[in-house]
């Protein structure tokens, strides 16, 4: 029960992140966790897919150290977000003017990512719920309080507005959540409770 | 039962009042002002007060005698997850989506999240007027990209296409390229409408009107039939020949608009008065229109209207003619069109994949039969809606108009008034000796005839402490009879006070509560005692003994096993407990009339009460032990 048990399943950081020892996190210097984030076993977080120095900078070779000083952020995760088992977080990528480059993936607060979901979205707002087995295509934008149902495939570039429920393959807007969604303790507001029980025996 | 176990639903009381009955409504209005005698009876009855009260006073309403059955078909309409319910402060009642009315605050495109002014919504056809399109094949959003981008040339110029990131369809498949990456909708409209006929805009409307003026609608039909029609047929045939050539779209929308304009001009020209209801947009079913039609048919025996068109006498209403030219929207089906369609469907280069599916065709114009005729669909707009109470018209929810904003100007959700129920199974400490590691029972496979303890937490969001009385039928309704006991049916929930109060309280008094709560694993559920208590929440224990499923055990003693098994329906094994929640609290009288009634003392508190049914979905009962 005490957080600093010798060899628990979870590593707890200073900011309260609970990270499973069995998760696979690549490129940690490109990942920002907001604190109180839970990352469960076998989750894969690809911080190594960060945006390379842009072509404009490479033509100007005078300041490469400046870029190395400030590593570009690949993945940002907000507070009380929860990455379930075997979920994959992957920064989105895009072919722009013939150059394939990665873009940052931003995840807001109180976000739940279900088991074995694949997230390649550009951004997930606050209080977003991603169901188990869902796939979020590259550069998709999920706004606050949106719900992605289990097994949905959100096509690349799709925008899911706030309060909307999407489901299906490809995902379509199938409904809306109630106004009380996201109230602490109710549906969409369970993040603190979820965080609290993680790592407890 | 769409949610994973355990879940809680709350029944909106509106299901009991299907017909608006003024007498009932008055009573429900009064009920929040608690009548004193009712309180005593309520307090004395513990568990199954509903049944006892039914025995006691027969003159009570019928619905008060019955307990709530979550399986009855009616319950489908009243059970809602707590977060979907609203609360009307004037009716003092829970409001579900059925007892509210909605009004649109703003329209926005779900793809680009731009607001569309309501004046533009109709002219845009309720769809996004910008660059947002859905794939006609799979409905995924389309992206604007250059052809060069796909091939890898880094120019960033050149023709643009819409491409689907899901099924890889592009507008190249239907031979459409765009010159610039902006304003695609109007570009597309020009492409699809420019082939023939009038585009539907103001200019064409005037054009067709002018055309209609040239030929008086009541000019003799015979001459038109002789002169105009053959020539029209010829042109129609030629255009229908063109239909099979690469640009098959005569523009169904344009044709519809032309027809609409034609009939509108006809109506306005043949109407008796300028304020004829038919000429207005919605007046087709008005009494005036009916009157006009009746007189039309009554006088049609004499073909008097043929020559009286310009006079427009009241006694002889003029006769409307039908569309006669292509510019008016007439299209004559060519005889071999169907056989050509069949031929094309049967040809090997079309095949199954070349034919548009039914779901694809529903979104397209009715002529579209093949995949290569599908046009990108502008994204349908969505709305933000304000919600009003149906009975008192007070606004319950009013979101901010901006599409990006998630805030509300007014948001009276039920969760701020009724306690939020959460359900949690208690780890079976009796089953395993190691108290700390007792596994939580598998809610999808509850074994029958084995007692389970379920923790029901009610969290109060009001700023007043609330007294709660819970009641359940001792045996759940349905075929599977599960015994349910609320170990502590009466308790109090603290006020949702300031966070600072919580911090201070935690430092002092209820620390002991907290500590006992921490050692929850070792505690034994006791009758009449609250399991755990916090600042604004209280947890009580429900003891549940799941019943046996019929047919699972022959020696179960259930008579007529086979009959019951025959009537056994899907989800009958789901354990759902109806719980009657009665809450009472002392609210500050903030309404004016109440202040007027009593001399406004500073401490005038109004006792309020609210009662409703909720359903706890505990789990699914296993078939065998």
Image (tube, coloured by chain):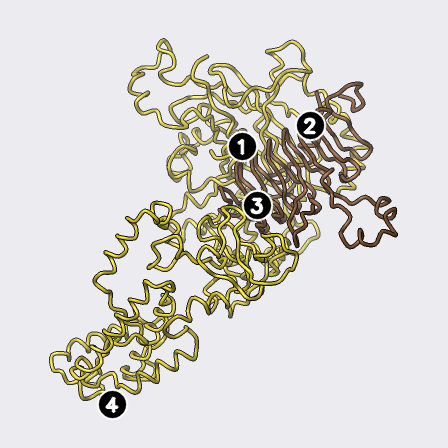
Q: Is mark 3 on a helix, strand or loop?
A: helix
Q: In whole angstroms, how far apart are the C-alphas of marks 2 and 1? A: 18 Å
Give me the chain letter of mark 2: A
Q: Residues within 10 Å of mark 2 (few under 14, many from 20)?
A: few
Give me the chain letter of mark 1: B
Considering only vertical position in the picture, is A76 above or below B195? above
Q: What element carries label 1?
A: strand
Give me the chain letter of mark 3: B
Q: In whole angstroms, how far apart are the C-alphas of marks 3 and 4? A: 64 Å
Q: Nearer the viewer, residue B476 or B122?
A: B122
Considering only vertical position in the picture, is B163 above or below A29? below
Q: Can residue B465 be seen in this view?
A: yes
Q: Which of B625 and A64 is in front in this view?
A: A64
Q: Are marks 2 and 1 on the same chain?
A: no
Q: Name the residue rendered at 87%, 51% in the picture.
A: A63
Instruction: Write down the colour of chain A.
Output: brown
The residue tagged 1 is B7
From the rendered image, report the letter of the chain displayed in yellow. B
The residue tagged 3 is B414
The residue tagged 4 is B310
Q: How crowded is mark 4: few (under 14 residues within 10 Å), some or many (20 or more)?
A: some
Q: Do labels 3 and 4 share a chain?
A: yes
Q: In whole angstroms, how far apart are the C-alphas of marks 2 and 4? A: 85 Å
Q: How crowded is mark 1: few (under 14 residues within 10 Å), some or many (20 or more)?
A: many
């Amino acid at each position: 029960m005490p957080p600093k048990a010798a060899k628990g399943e979870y590593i707890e950081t200073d900011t309260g992140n609970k990270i499973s020892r069995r998760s696979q996190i690549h490129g940690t210097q490109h990942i920002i966790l907001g604190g109180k984030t839970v990352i469960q076993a076998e989750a894969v977080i690809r911080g190594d897919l960060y945006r390379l120095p842009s072509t404009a900078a490479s033509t100007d070779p005078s300041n490469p150290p400046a870029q190395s000083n400030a590593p570009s952020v690949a993945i940002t995760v907000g507070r009380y977000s929860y990455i379930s088992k075997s979920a994959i977080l992957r920064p989105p990528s895009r072919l722009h003017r013939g150059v394939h480059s990665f873009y940052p993936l931003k995840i807001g607060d109180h976000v739940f990512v279900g088991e074995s979901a694949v997230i390649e979205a550009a951004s997930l707002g606050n209080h977003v719920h991603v169901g188990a087995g869902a796939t979020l295509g590259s550069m998709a934008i999920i706004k606050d309080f949106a719900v992605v149902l289990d097994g949905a495939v959100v096509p690349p570039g799709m925008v899911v507005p706030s309060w909307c429920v999407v489901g299906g393959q490809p995902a379509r807007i199938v409904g809306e959540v109630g106004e009380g969604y996201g109230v602490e303790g109710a549906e969409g507001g369970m993040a603190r409770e979820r965080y609290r029980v993680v790592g407890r025996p | 039962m769409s949610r994973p176990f355990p879940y809680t639903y709350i029944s909106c009381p509106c299901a009991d009042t299907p017909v608006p009955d003024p007498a009932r409504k008055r009573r429900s209005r009064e009920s929040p002002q608690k009548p004193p005698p009712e309180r005593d009876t309520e307090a004395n009855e513990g568990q199954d007060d509903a049944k006892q009260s039914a025995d006691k006073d027969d003159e009570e309403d019928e619905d008060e005698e019955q307990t709530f059955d979550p399986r009855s078909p009616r319950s489908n309409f009243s059970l809602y997850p707590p977060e979907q319910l609203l609360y009307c402060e004037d009716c003092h009642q829970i409001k579900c989506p059925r007892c509210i009315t909605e009004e649109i605050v703003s329209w926005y495109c779900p793809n680009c999240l731009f607001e569309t002014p309501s004046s533009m919504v109709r002219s845009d056809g309720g769809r996004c007027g910008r660059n947002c399109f859905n794939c006609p094949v799979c409905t995924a959003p389309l992206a604007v990209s250059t052809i060069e981008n796909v091939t890898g040339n880094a120019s960033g110029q050149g023709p643009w296409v819409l491409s689907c990131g899901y099924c890889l369809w592009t507008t190249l498949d239907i031979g459409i390229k765009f010159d610039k990456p902006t304003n695609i909708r109007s570009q597309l409209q020009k492409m699809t409408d420019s082939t023939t006929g009038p585009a539907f805009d103001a200019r064409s409307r005037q054009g067709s009107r002018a055309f209609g003026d040239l030929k008086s609608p009541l000019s003799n039909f015979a001459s038109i039939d002789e002169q105009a029609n053959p020539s029209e047929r010829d042109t129609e045939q030629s255009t229908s020949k063109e239909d099979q050539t690469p640009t098959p779209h005569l523009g169904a929308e344009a044709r519809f608009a032309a027809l609409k304009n034609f009939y509108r001009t006809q109506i306005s020209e043949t109407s008796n008065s300028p304020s004829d209801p038919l000429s207005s947009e919605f007046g087709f079913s008005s009494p005036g229109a009916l009157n006009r039609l009746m007189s039309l048919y009554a006088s049609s025996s004499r073909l008097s209207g043929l020559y009286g068109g310009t006079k427009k006498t009241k006694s002889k209403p003029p006769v409307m003619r039908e569309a006669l030219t292509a510019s008016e929207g007439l299209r004559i089906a060519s005889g071999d069109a169907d056989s050509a369609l069949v031929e094309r469907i049967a040809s090997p280069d079309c095949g199954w994949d070349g034919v548009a599916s039914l779901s694809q065709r529903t979104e397209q114009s009715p002529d579209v039969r093949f995949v290569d005729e599908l046009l990108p669909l502008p994204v349908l707009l969505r709305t933000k809606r304000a919600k009003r109470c149906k009975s008192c018209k007070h606004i319950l929810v009013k979101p901010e108009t901006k599409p990006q904003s998630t805030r509300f100007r007014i948001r009276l959700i039920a969760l701020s008034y009724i306690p939020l129920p959460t359900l949690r199974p208690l780890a079976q400490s009796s089953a395993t000796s190691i108290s700390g590691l007792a596994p939580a029972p598998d809610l999808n496979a509850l074994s029958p005839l084995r007692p389970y303890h379920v923790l029901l937490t009610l969290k109060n969001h009001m700023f007043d402490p609330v007294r709660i009385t819970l009641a359940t039928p001792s045996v759940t309704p349905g075929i599977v009879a599960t015994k349910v006991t609320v170990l502590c049916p009466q308790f109090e929930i603290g006020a949702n006070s300031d966070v600072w109060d919580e911090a201070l309280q935690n430092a002092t008094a209820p620390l002991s509560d907290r500590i006992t709560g921490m050692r929850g694993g070792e505690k034994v559920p006791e009758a009449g005692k609250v399991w755990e208590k916090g600042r604004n929440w209280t947890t009580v224990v429900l003891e549940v003994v799941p019943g046996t499923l019929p047919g699972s055990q022959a020696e179960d003693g259930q008579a007529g096993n086979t009959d019951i098994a025959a009537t056994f329906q899907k989800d009958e094994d789901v354990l759902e407990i109806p719980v009657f929640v009665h809450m009472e609290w002392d609210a500050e009288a903030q309404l004016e009339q109440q202040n007027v009634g009593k001399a406004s003392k500073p401490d005038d508190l109004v006792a309020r009460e609210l009662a409703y049914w909720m359903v706890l979905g505990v789990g699914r009962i296993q078939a065998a032990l």
